Image: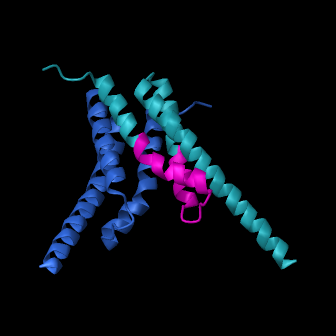
Chain colours: A blue, B cyan
Amino acid sequence: MQLPSIEVIGYIAAFCTTSSFLPQAILTIRTKDTKSLSLSMYSLFTIGVSLWLIYGIYKEDLALIWANSITLILSGIILSFKITNMVKSFLEKSRLKK
Amino acid sequence: MQLPSIEVIGYIAAFCTTSSFLPQAILTIRTKDTKSLSLSMYSLFTIGVSLWLIYGIYKEDLALIWANSITLILSGIILSFKITNMVKSFLEKSRLKK
């Protein structure tokens, strides 16, 4: 039996970790509810994924590039919802205080 | 100004994505409460991280090895708690049915 090439293992790894992030992403994109998500955690994660993407591009590593591009799009959307909701909530509070 | 070497970027990426996973891991390890965690999502994630680790070892990529070793330990602990809790709950239910 021939073992799968290491590139195939990289793509399966990319598929698994990206897919495991999908349900949260779909839920947040659909509901736009970000109350139970942590801003610091998602910021750190999004920065980390961006750096992995730069690392993958530099190393010309396609599995890393694919995995982190898709995850970056998803976590970027979630993070932008989180920030938009926080700004909205802040503006609402200042409006009520007047 | 000299740009940081790509290896340093890899280590910062590893630090960011691993740290962003820590609060969930610490919370679950401390409370052992896994009710709100999805078995399929954590299984997929743990398989993915294991494959990234194999990929990193094969590519002799230290940033990938470090990031995925630590994350694998954490997600492995969470997954084992989830499975233990499910087995316990199943046994409890069958005991009550008797």
Q: Main secondary structure of the magenta part?
A: helix
Q: Is residue B44 magenta?
A: yes
Q: In the rendered view of the protein, which quadrant contains the N terminus of chain A?
A: top right
Count of marks placed on residues: 0
Q: Is residue A37 magenta?
A: no
Residue at screen point 20% across, 69% down: A90
Q: Front-most of B15 and A61? A: B15
Q: In the rendered view of the protein, which quadrant contains the C terminus of chain A?
A: bottom left
Describe residue A31's horizontal placement relative to residue B4 as left or right: right
Can residue B57 be seen in this snapshot?
yes
Residue at screen point 52% across, 34% down: B69
Describe residue B6's horizontal placement relative to residue B93 as left or right: left
Please provide percent x and percent y for residue A52: 32, 37
Can residue A16 be seen in this snapshot?
no
For the record, the magenta segment spans B18-47
Q: Compared with residue A48, is residue A97 higher up or lower down, i.e. above or below?
A: below
Residue at screen point 36% across, 29% down: B11
Q: Residue furthest right?
A: B98
Describe residue A28's horizontal placement relative to residue B89 as left or right: left
Please provide percent x and percent y for residue B28: 56, 54
Q: Front-most of A80 and A54? A: A80
Q: Front-most of A48 and A20? A: A48
**Residue B14, quarter of the rendered image:** top left
Please provide percent x and percent y for residue A38: 36, 58
Describe residue B64's horizontal placement relative to residue A80 as left or right: right
Q: Front-most of B52 and B78? A: B78
Q: Compared with residue B23, is residue B9 higher up or lower down, i.e. above or below?
A: above
**Residue A32, quarter of the rendered image:** bottom left
Please provide percent x and percent y for residue A3: 57, 31
Q: Residue furthest front?
A: A97
